[in-house]
Amino acid sequence: MTLPLWILAALAMGIGIWFSVSHPEVALAPPGWLTPLAIAVAVAGIALAWLVYGLRAISADRLFESFAWIGEAAVERFWLDDLFALVYRRVILGVSRATGWVDRYIVDGILNALSAWTLTAGDRLRRIQTGQAQDYLYGIALGVLLLMVWMRWPK
Amino acid sequence: MSSFLASFPVLSVITWAPFVGAILIMFLARRSAALVRGLAVLSTSVSLVLSIAVYVAYDREAAGFQFYEDFPLVPALGINYQLGVDGMSLLMILLTSIIIFAGTWASWTVKVRSQEFYALLLILVTGVYGVFVSLDLFVLFLFYEIAVLPMYLLIGIWGSSGEVRPQGVFGWAFGRTGVGTKEYAAMKLTLYLLFGSAFILVGILALYVAGDSSSFSFLEMELTQFDPKLQSWVFLAFYVGFGILAGIWPLHTWSPDGHASAPTAVSMLHAGVLMKLGAYGVVRLGMGLLPDGTLQWSWLVGTIACVNIVYGAFSAMAQTDLKYVIAYSSVSHMGVVMLGMATLTEVGLNGSVFQMFAHGIMTGLFFALVGLVYEKSHSREIFKMSGFGRMMPGIATAFTIAGLSSLGLPATAGFVAELLTFLGAWQSSHAWWLFPGVLGAYLTSVYVLRVTKQIFWGPPSTDPHFQNLPDARGPEWAALWILVGTIVLFGVWPSLALGPVDTATMPLLNRLWVLQ
Amino acid sequence: MSGLSVGGPLGLELGLAVLMLLVFFVGLFMRSEDKRRVGVLSAIGLVILFGLAWRAEGGTEMFRGALVQDELALFFKRLLILSTLIGVLASLSLRAVAFARRATEYYLAILASLLGMLILASARDLILLFVAFELMSIPLYYLAGFLKREPEAVEAALKFFLVGTVSSAVLAYGLSFIYGVAGTTDVRAIAAAMSTGHPMMLLGMLLALGGLGFKIAAFPFHMWVPDTYEAASTPFVAWLSVAPKAAGFVVIFRLYLEGMGDRVLFWVPAAAGLATVTIIGGNLMAIPQQNVKRLLAYSGVAHIGYMLIGFAAVSANGVAMMLFYLVAYLFGNMGAFLVVEAVAQAEGSEGVAAYRGLAQRSPILALCMLLFLLSLGGIPFVAGFWAKLYVFWAAAEQGLYWLVLVGAVLTVVALFYYLLIAKSMYIDAPERRDPIPVAPLLSFCIFLCVLGVVLLGLYPKPLVVAALRAAGPLF
């Protein structure tokens, strides 16, 4: 399993060294102190890790205690995962639940209400059909009256 | 080949072949289920093959409307049977052919009254083809109505009902209208879409009258300069009328219930193609004929599109029924389509048309898969299913690919569509539209991956119902392969689609830019 | 005298009168109890008349213009005779004993009413108009209550009669004012009288409109319709839903449109208002109906509203599209009623529930009903689609976009209740599996109507051309 790792490491180092040696892109050249500094920090980190975990010359636990709250925060992964989970569960899922509810019960609800009102309107309107002949005659009278009012109105 | 294709009315054949198939099915295939399916596959294959032929034979240099057909219907009123395709409708025809062909295979297991099912489906498809190829507004409207009405019977007879408990201040209306049943979904869809068509009709008649009442021909109206005030309200009429079909917020609520209650092929066709009819209508009639109106109202189209994208994505996330997730996802992705056209940029409009195609294929694939999962597990409850990937790896892979296209992963068609649209948004006069768009893409990945992981890639379910479920079998593979292949093909080779589409969108936008 | 020849204005009416006499005497001297052969005789006579109507030519006048046979009159006469023919043929399938024993009176009444309608189509004189109007109406009251042993029929006939007579009185009152201002009973003088602006003229015209509104069943003059349609025998109702309304419309054309020229625009508010309330009222009231006959009654009211949209366009196109609509409505509505009769004869019920699973029991009958419903609803491939679109087009030409929108939106409401019937037929499961037996004559009539609906839906052009030609003389 380490063979792929060795190959990838070799490739990465090879390309990096070749780039820095052949200076292909002058425009992207970093300030002179950056590369030596980066290499120095990396080497120092590797050295420290070897000392603490390889040679066990320095106690990992004492190191951990000396960092106090930073160490504990690191164990909690600086609460970043918790933040993501919180945003996901509370905010995103919460908003989505609210949106889903609004869509089904308010937006669609309005539509259902409109259609229910139309059904009711039909139901109510049909009750003018009372079955009494007198009312039918009133209907005619009303109709003629409305026609007259409607046509006379602009005058 | 173009001379061969030009020698017969190829567009009419594409449009009417399914209808002929439907008639044959109704009269010949009384007893034999195999004959029904054979005729359906045959007629859709004819349309598919011819669509691909027309697609390839289309002359991108010449652009404009080709394969023109003209036949007078009622000359006294200026109604003519005029057909033609340009780059945009070409892609839509291809989309329709692919989806209905796949849909015919996906409906293989419809047992109850399959003869009528296939007949109605094919009649519906004729209507869809007709809208895309019509160059006469009256005939377009006629085909639109044909595309809507069979939905009522298709959903009402072969659909599925669910249960919805009334809540909220409008809860009293839920019992009155029968929310949750397939009859409710069917009636709501049909009436809502026909309501939209009322507005379209008024708009068409207004343009006819304003154009000196000589004809309903799109080509002639394109040359007419309509009064800007007229354009303003007619554009709105078209936007509302076609927008209802495209699923613009808040007029989209026919869509979730309609798609969820409908049988598989009907959902594939509806979310995959019919909603695109709406967007196509806005582009072709709204933007194509009414440049002043477009400029005036593009802010509204784009803003509502942003609402669609984000609102649809959030709603999709909240669903526990798999079909509803995909239905709301369609609402969200149609927002991307509408956003692209509202940007009034070349890259945006191209993205919009490409998204019509990409999303059409993708959602067709989704619904086909959901149909398969439901058929095998008899459940659509997302959080009860898990670990299906082990039992049905083929379906799981197809579902994942569809999901990746949905969230816009490169190498899928969805990526190209969304990238172009977002670029267009940034270039438009309302650059802020980019942010809801991208937010929508992010939210899409959240709910798509969540659902995919939950159903397919998690630990196997302990529920006794979900043991030893079979993978896709025989004809079921056909639909999946075709659709997955298309997604990947157009994802790695987008110019296949963008080539012709661009020849159509450029002239359209030039008319608009001249006015700006 | 040229008028007495077939081509003249009275040719068809005289032929009909001869037929009536024949029917009367044959029925009188027939010895058997079953006198339905009289109906067959009537049908044959009507077929001959229909043929003659096609051979007749327009452009003749009689009695100094009191009777005119123009293209409009011919169009209506052909429509009326066709409608009556279908009604008579369908009536022959009725099984109640009364229809056999008293067939002579039944068919005689129908023919008498038709005679009134035919004269009405040609009349251009106020008195002639009124007399023909009554000749048309009175047999209808009798026919509505034909089944005199059924209390509902008697009640419906009585209401029909009361409302009808009052409406006739209102009409006569209005006509009297018109005469008062115009100074003559010639309809052609109305145009000049209107331009004097005399308020009594307007009053007269509005009163007449109210009286006529009853006949065409516009809202709120329609209230007799549901009761009468529900209680009377269905083939008669099928004919009643078309022919008298058509006759009413031709009178409206003659009185309000003919020769008015530009002053016709005066009627637009009245027509638009009437159309709007009729469409809204008719459609809304149809929604809760469980009895299909009553539903079709209210939907018929709504259709009159759509025709009035064409009227509101007050143009030759508007009238032509109304004529097209009338023909489409004839086939769609009569067809639907005949299917109702078929189902009622087999199932004994006119409720929507009786249609459950009809598609699986009698697929052809269900398909016919579906085609009728789609035509009434205005869906493509059947006649009603073109009809609705044409009236909307005519109104849009005059700039009445709001009216078109109201009409188009209410079409959605109408489709709701039409689809409910379709749902019952196609989606619901049937109670029994056996097919519905349909009397052969009824099948024939249904088939005729389907033919009409489908042919017009696929090839509307000839009728459009004919309608435009018929509307020409008015303007």
Image (cartoon, coloured by chain):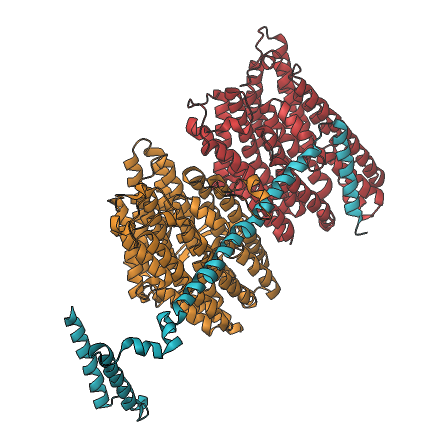
- Residue at horizontal 54 percent and vertical 50 percent from the top: A105
Taking the image as shown, residue C393 lies to the left or right of residue B348, namely right
Question: Quick one: which residue is furthest to the top in this view?
Answer: C31
Location of residue A43 (image quadrant): bottom left
Q: The red chain is which one?
A: C
* Viewer-side residue, B511 vs B175: B175
Taking the image as shown, residue C234 lies to the left or right of residue C204, namely left
- Residue at horizontal 54 percent and vertical 34 percent from the top: C332
Residue B69 in picture, x, y percent from top left: 40, 54
Above or below A67: residue B18: above
Question: Quick one: which residue is furthest to the bottom in this view?
Answer: A32
- Residue at horizontal 24 percent and vertical 90 percent from the top: A23
Q: Is residue B255 visible?
A: yes
Residue A124 in picture, x, y percent from top left: 67, 37
Residue C322 in picture, x, y percent from top left: 61, 41
* Viewer-side residue, A83 vs B17: A83
Residue A27 in picture, x, y percent from top left: 32, 90
Taking the image as shown, residue A143 lies to the left or right of residue B350, namely right
Location of residue A142 (image quadrant): top right
Above or below C284: residue C342: above
What is the number of callouts on the image? 0
Q: Which chain is cyan?
A: A
Q: Is residue C260 visible?
A: no
Colour used to depict chain B in the structure image: orange
